[in-house]
Image (tube, rainbow, N blue to C red):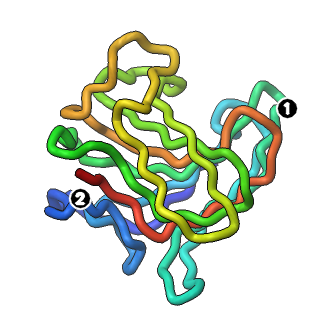
Amino acid sequence: MTTVLGAGTVSGGDPDGLIDDFADGQSRLGTPWRLVTDQVMGGVSTGRMARSEQDGRSLLCMTGDVSLANNGGFVQVNLDLGTPARLDASTYTGIRLVVRGNGEVYNLHLKTAATTMPWQSYRAEFVADDTWREVRLPFAAFTPHRLVPALDVTRLKRLGIVAIGRAMQAELCVDEIGFYR
């Protein structure tokens, strides 16, 4: 299952590193958010992506039921970081998110020019509990999954916020996402 929110053209991003504050219908990069579940490969996980307002914040929320049945196990919202160009994030230290969730462990996945297969990514984990907090994930914390090359932040293509790897209820809202120095 794939769902697209927003649309637009690449605008080159934001000089302060902000990728999205969800204040309007598209990211600062001009690319749309998409929901993808393991149904694209025969799994049975279900998910929903919605924009909402809570506590005076504009949000992107991902909810769903992650199931391991039929070799599945993920619900994801993702965003292309450039079309067709790749984003060079070498002047930044990592990615920051302002999140609130249900206490589960989530992943942030990065794709680069080296990730040619759908199951390949660079991954870092974070916990989203029931209070708003900023999570900072340095690029050094991302580990390669099913590929050998180290993360090349000069060739970023996509990022994904993912509930993955175990049966769980996903409930995560993001207020902001961006790069930090």
Helix, strand or loop at label 1? It is helix
| Viewer-proximal residue among 25 and 133 | 133
Residue 43's image quarter? Answer: top right
Please indicate whether residue 1 sits to the left or right of residue 29 in the image.
Answer: right
Q: Amino acid at mark 1?
A: Ala
Q: Position of residue 179 (x, y in %)?
A: 29, 53
In the rendered image of this protein, does residue 55 appear above or below residue 102? below
Q: Position of residue 91 (x, y in %)?
A: 15, 44
Near mark 2 (Cα within 10 A), the count class, few <14, some 14-19 or many ≥20, is some
Please indicate whether residue 44 sits to the left or right of residue 134 in the image.
Answer: right
Helix, strand or loop at label 2? It is loop
Near mark 1 (Cα within 10 A), the count class, few <14, some 14-19 or many ≥20, is few
Q: Position of residue 134 (x, y in %)?
A: 47, 62
Picture residue at 19% right of the left edge, 64% below the top = 16
| Viewer-proximal residue among 59 and 98 | 98
Q: Amino acid at mark 2?
A: Gly
Residue 51, visible in the rendered structure = yes
Picture residue at 48% right of the left edge, 80% below the top = 58
Could you tell me how far apart the alpha carbons at marks 1 and 2 are, in whole angstroms?
Answer: 38 Å
Q: In the drawing, what numbered circle is on residue 17?
A: 2
Q: Which residue is mark 1?
A: 69
Please report whichever mark, 1 or 2, sits nearer to the chain's N-terminal start: 2
Picture residue at 53% right of the left edge, 68% below the top = 60
Picture residue at 67% right of the left edge, 38% below the top = 164
| Viewer-proximal residue among 86 and 9 | 86
Please indicate whether residue 30 sits to the left or right of residue 171 in the image.
Answer: left
In the rendered image of this protein, does residue 158 appear above or below residue 173? above
| Viewer-proximal residue among 107 and 134 | 134
